[in-house]
Image (cartoon, rainbow, N blue to C red):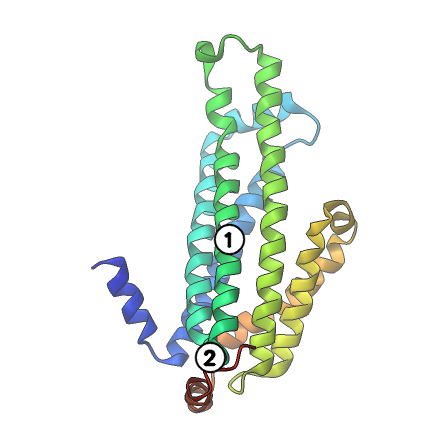
């Protein structure tokens, strides 16, 4: 079955099914991206020590590959999550929902770049004589540099993710088929992630940003998985939105 056919079947699914699938992909993205980018790299990377980091990567190659695969699954899951949210919240405002989808697709592209930067150190460290112009310490330093670039790219992704959360929070708040408080909490979480416009400040405030994220994202995820949406109200709002296409926001 083609990708277009699958997307068409998803688009024709009931609002409750869309909501539960969105919640499932939200959970999958959170687990896989966190495992790859946070847990695995946190275990293997020794800040400021290129030699120890290189030894950890080469000594735990399977774990490193698993972290890379997990991060890549996170990107795919986020694209699916974004598509389902667009389908779900275009009933509130099609243009705003489409704009939010464009924002997170750019974010997912950046997230995909982090995966490339993630895996780059491995072929560098395994290059052997093919990179004979470099000394071993230089190769180790280059590998650590790519991992630093991975972190910088991930910070950029978080800014786009934060903006998307704020936009989706507005859509949830304006919806009639989900509790408005979920939208407020998600928007607050989004503002927190957008603090990565200035990473040094965000790093100092990380514990507060993480708490805001948990308070904003976990209740939404659980609501989608357990309660989904009020299907009757979704259909009523979709009909109203369709009848007033002239509205911009």
**Could you tell me which residue is drawn at 56 percent across and 76 percent down?**
171
**Where is residue 170 shown, x and y percent of the image?**
60, 75
Q: Position of residue 199 (x, y in %)?
A: 72, 46
Residue 148 in the image: above or below residue 7: above
Q: Callout 2: helix, strand or loop? A: loop
Based on the displayed image, in which of its 4 quarters is residue 66 positioned?
A: top left
Nearest the viewer among 2 and 213 is 2
Left/right of residue 80 with respect to residue 121 in the rendered view: left
Name the residue beneath numbered marker 2.
Answer: 228
Residue 30 vertical position relative to residue 53 in the rendered view, above or below: below
* Nearer the observer, 37 or 154: 154
Quadrant where the N terminus sits is bottom left
Alpha carbon distance from label 2 to label 1 = 27 Å
Q: Residue at x 58, y 12 (%)?
A: 136
Q: Quadrant of the C terminus?
A: bottom right
Name the residue carrying label 1: 106
Local crowd size for mark 1, using a 10 Å CA cut-off: few (<14), some (14–19), many (≥20): some
Q: Mark 2 touching mark 1, by CB under 8 A?
A: no
What is the x, y in percent for residue 157? 58, 50
Q: Position of residue 242 (x, y in %)?
A: 42, 85
Q: Quick one: label 2, few (<14), some, or many (20+) residues within 10 Å?
A: many
Seen at 58% across and 10% down, the residue is 135
Apparent side of residue 232 relative to residue 60 in the rendered image (left or right): left
Whether 235 is drawn above or below 132: the answer is below
Residue in the image at 66% along x and 57% along y: 193
Secondary structure, mark 1, is helix
- Which is nearer the N-term, disc 2 or disc 1? 1
Q: Residue furthest front?
A: 246
């Amino acid at each position: 079955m083609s990708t277009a056919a699958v997307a068409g079947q998803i688009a024709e699914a009931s609002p409750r099914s869309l909501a539960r699938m969105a919640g499932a992909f939200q959970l999958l993205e959170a687990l896989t991206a966190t495992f790859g980018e946070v847990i695995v790299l946190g275990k293997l990377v020794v800040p400021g020590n290129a030699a120890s980091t290189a030894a950890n990567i080469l000594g735990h190659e399977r774990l490193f590959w698993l972290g890379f695969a997990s991060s890549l699954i996170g990107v795919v899951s986020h694209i699916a999550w974004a598509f389902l949210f667009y389908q779900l919240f275009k009933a509130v405002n099609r243009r705003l929902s489409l704009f939010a989808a464009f924002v997170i697709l750019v974010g997912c592209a950046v997230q995909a770049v982090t995966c490339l930067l993630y895996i780059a150190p491995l072929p560098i460290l395994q290059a052997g004589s093919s990179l004979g112009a470099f000394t071993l310490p230089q190769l180790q330093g280059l590998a650590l540099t790519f991992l630093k670039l991975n972190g910088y790219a991930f910070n950029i992704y978080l800014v786009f993710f934060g903006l998307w959360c704020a936009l989706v929070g507005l859509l949830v708040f304006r919806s009639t088929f989900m509790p408005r408080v979920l939208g407020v909490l998600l928007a607050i979480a989004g503002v927190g992630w957008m603090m990565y416009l200035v990473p040094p400040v965000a790093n100092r405030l990380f514990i507060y940003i993480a708490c805001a994220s948990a308070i904003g994202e976990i209740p939404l995820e659980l609501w989608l998985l357990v309660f989904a949406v009020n299907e009757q109200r979704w259909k009523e709002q979709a009909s109203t939105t369709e009848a007033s296409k002239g509205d911009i926001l």
